[in-house]
Amino acid sequence: MRRDPAGGRYLRPLVRGFSLLRFPLLNKGTAFTEAERRALGLDGLLAPQIDTLDELVERQYAEYRAIPEPLDKHVFLRNLQDRNEVLFYALLSQHVEEMLPIVYTPTVGRAVQEFSRIYRYPRGLTLSTRTIDRAAQALANVPLNDVRIIVATDSSAILGIGDQGFGGMAISIGKLSLYTVAGGVGPDKTLPVELDVGTARADLREDPGYLGVKHERLTGDAYLSFLDRFVEATLERYPKAIIQWEDFAKDAAFEVLARYRRVVPSFNDDIQGTGAVVLAGVLGACRVRGERFADQVMVVHGAGAGGAGVAAALRDGLRREGLSPEEIARRVYVLDSRGLLVDDRPMEPYKQALATPRAQVAGWAGLGLETVIREAGATALLGLSGQAGIFSEAVVRAAQTNTPRPLIFPLSNPTANSEALPEDLLRWTGGQAMVATGSPFAPVTLDGVTHEIGQGNNAFIFPGLGFGAILARVREITDDMVAAAAFALADYTAAQWPGRIYPPVSDLRGASLQVAAAVIQQALRDGVATEFALRGLNDDALRSAVERAFWQPDYLPFRLDEGEAAGD
Ligand SMILES: O=C([O-])CC(=O)C(=O)O
Ligand SMILES: [Mg+2]
């Protein structure tokens, strides 16, 4: 992108003619003007009609509406993205609420599973055991010069659906669409990455149609060495990039975050993003109920990256309220598939910090979900187990004996993995449960009252967190920046959407702007920001600066420099 002396934005293309039409970031299809067609060697290659962006959006939208199946809609939008990226984002921006469940959760889960079958056109960077020795060359081949945000997955724990091998690329692509539509990052600044270290799934390895490498996953030193080479080559080619680690299985998630967060500014979306969004939702629900957060007793079901991240965020939130470690231990309980984490039980090292002291559960009737809810007096249930239906009627009734309006958040994705259906939760509790889910659900009408179902998805955190970190040019993403994102989201919801636990998805952009501004403030306070132009701005000025930096889908005019013509 360039600017003329009057400040007008324009493009000076390095490719011309047919190649220009094949470059999704530059292609305008029939919106190339008469003059551009002549100057850029496009005469004869396009339909005669000349359209505006709005006309193209209308036409694509009509086609989109005619497609019945969500996965086919996803493929349609992905094809558009790979053909004409500005048009894709213009369409998506105008229909965020309708299309988010298609480009993102839940349909992206299907796209991950079907990725080898729906794969059409390359996007992003794939590093595999075949290419990792040439990582620097692979990065040099990426046709983008100023990448600022990378979403990288090793696909070991995609959403709640486990190891998906090469298919995990679809989640990196989907998350980055949100970075652009909700987080304001230009698509030329985003890079989805699939780290194909193999798959533990024999069915994939034996499937002739599977497009990933067909061997067992790398583990131990070989795995870490693979990641080291990726990080090293990335730092070299894109020194200003931030990495979002996505959908790594629990042990790897913690290890990878700890290993690299001070080498390259990075965060783990499932641990930190999910932790922040759930903390914001619990704070929001307490405000709606007129109760104190510090008085809640919270049971986290699931101790993978998401569950552990949520428990850590809740504990951190309680610490900020002034509670002692002993008090916190009586407010947050974490269960994995073997029941409550109790400190004398064998468990993975990362879980130890979340375990309940044995003395505290002396005399309890058991350590399973329902018993823990009764014995602990739980007022909030947070589901991150990936186990569909685990929040059963008996479990929910147990929570309602402790409080008339329990908070019940079935957060596992995609929809089929949700711990409960909002409709059931509201029915079992006589409309009293305060419900938010990870995947989108339609409003529920019960006894004439309609309940909106908030979406407690990290989509309300990561676009703003990443955008703020990019604008502040941070050296590191601190825990306090993540916490600031959570509090900003809770404050924004209370101010703009009183009575709701989360804003509606239609306001993802507004929420992200607020999150980004808060993240910048915190980065400045933490001394990790290197963009000093943002120093000293008050909240309003900062929010305006963030808004001005927000990328908008628009067809920029193409101009050639003096004396240049097609074919030069
Ligand atoms: O992708 C989503 O919808 C949220 C998320 O990170 C996950 O479930 O792993
Ligand atoms: Mg995830």
Image (cartoon, grey):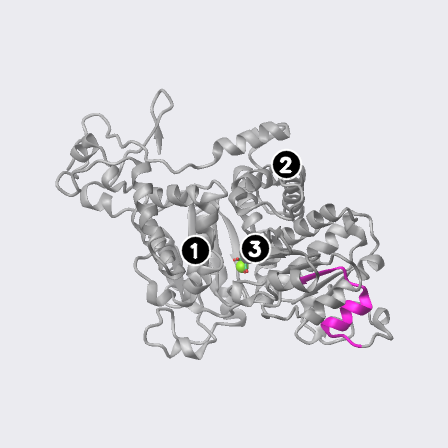
Confirm whether residue 483 shows in the render.
yes
Q: Earlier in the sequence, mark 3 or mark 2?
A: 3
Q: What's the residue type where badge 1 is placed?
A: Ile
1 or 3: tag closer to the N-terminus: 1
Q: Residue at x 73, y 50 (%)?
A: 317
Q: Is residue 7 above or below residue 406?
A: above
Between the C-alphas of marks 3 and 2, the distance is 20 Å
Residue at image coords 70%, 52%: 282
Image region (quadrant) for ligand 2: bottom right
| Residue 56 image point, x, y percent | 30, 41
Circle 2 sits on which residue?
521
Q: Nearer the viewer, residue 157 or 498?
A: 498
Distance of label 1 from label 2 (alpha carbons): 33 Å
Name the amino acid type tagged 2.
Gln
- Residue assigned mark 1: 102
Of badges 1 and 2, the one in the foreground is 1
Residue 54 lies left or right of residue 33; in this view the side is right
Q: Badge 3 is on which residue?
A: 269
Give the quarter of the image for residue 369: bottom right
Outermost top residue: 6
Residue at (15% x, 43% y) in the render: 45
* Residue 190 higher or lower than 404, as above or below: above
